[in-house]
Image (spheres, rainbow, N blue to C red):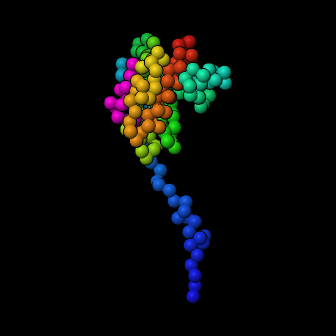
Amino acid sequence: MTRIHCAGPWFLPLTVMVAPAYAVDYLSAEQAQRLLIPGADSFLEQSVSLSEEQRDAIRARAGVRQRTDTQLVWRAERAGELLGWFIVDEVIGKHEFITYGAAISPQGAVMGIEIMSYRETHGGQVREEDWRANLAGKTLADPLRLGKDVPNISGATLSCRNVVDGVRRLLVLHEMVLTRD
């Protein structure tokens, strides 16, 4: 009689199967720019290179670290006048990155955010306009804390928290680097 061993090498592929990857790209940077700063007639890429000292200062002020040395930034203008800044950023959801665009006014207020790419299987409610609208108008003078001045979404807590933390970090970046232009 032949015995079948369940722990044999043929069993290995079954043990490494995981849920399929889930990624949806909703907007390109250009589409998000037009949605968030519709009056602009030009978006001038001015990506920012940050020194280690600047990254440390952003972390100290924002409470979250600036992961990269370079931040994708566009200066939005109409007839040469600065209307605001458009910044593409990524934060971790639960396991995967959430790519979003944020528009910040010259005075340092959030004009709006758009989720550009969402890769998680859960928590995609951060894409809902009603939730994103809670960030509009926020400045560094606001607490910008989930559950304080930005509501949580049940089932999307990590995505909500990390997007809010990312927006606070971008406001610090704006104040420290972009207002110097």
Q: Closer to the camera, 61 or 16? A: 61
Picture coordinates of residue 72 (x, y %)? 53, 27
User: Which residues are the magenta region?
Assistant: 126-137
Q: Position of residue 77 (x, y in %)?
A: 43, 16
- Magenta stretch: helix, strand or loop mostly: helix
Q: Residue at x 44, y 34 (%)?
A: 160
Look at 44% across and 37% down and name the residue there.
Answer: 157
| Above or below, comparing residue 139 to residue 13 in the picture | above
Q: Is residue 129 visible?
A: yes
Between 57 and 51, the one nearer to me in the picture: 57
**Which residue occupies 45% across, 18% down?**
142
User: Was residue 106 drawn as part of the magenta stretch in this picture?
Assistant: no
Is 44 placed above or below 4 here?
above
Question: Which residue in the rendered view is the most extreme toward the right?
Answer: 52
Q: Taking 55 as reference, is 25 left or right?
A: left
Q: Position of residue 145 (x, y in %)?
A: 46, 26
Q: Is residue 131 magenta?
A: yes
Residue 78 occupies quadrant: top left
Front residue of 122/118: it is 122
Is residue 2 toward the left or the right of residue 157 in the image? right
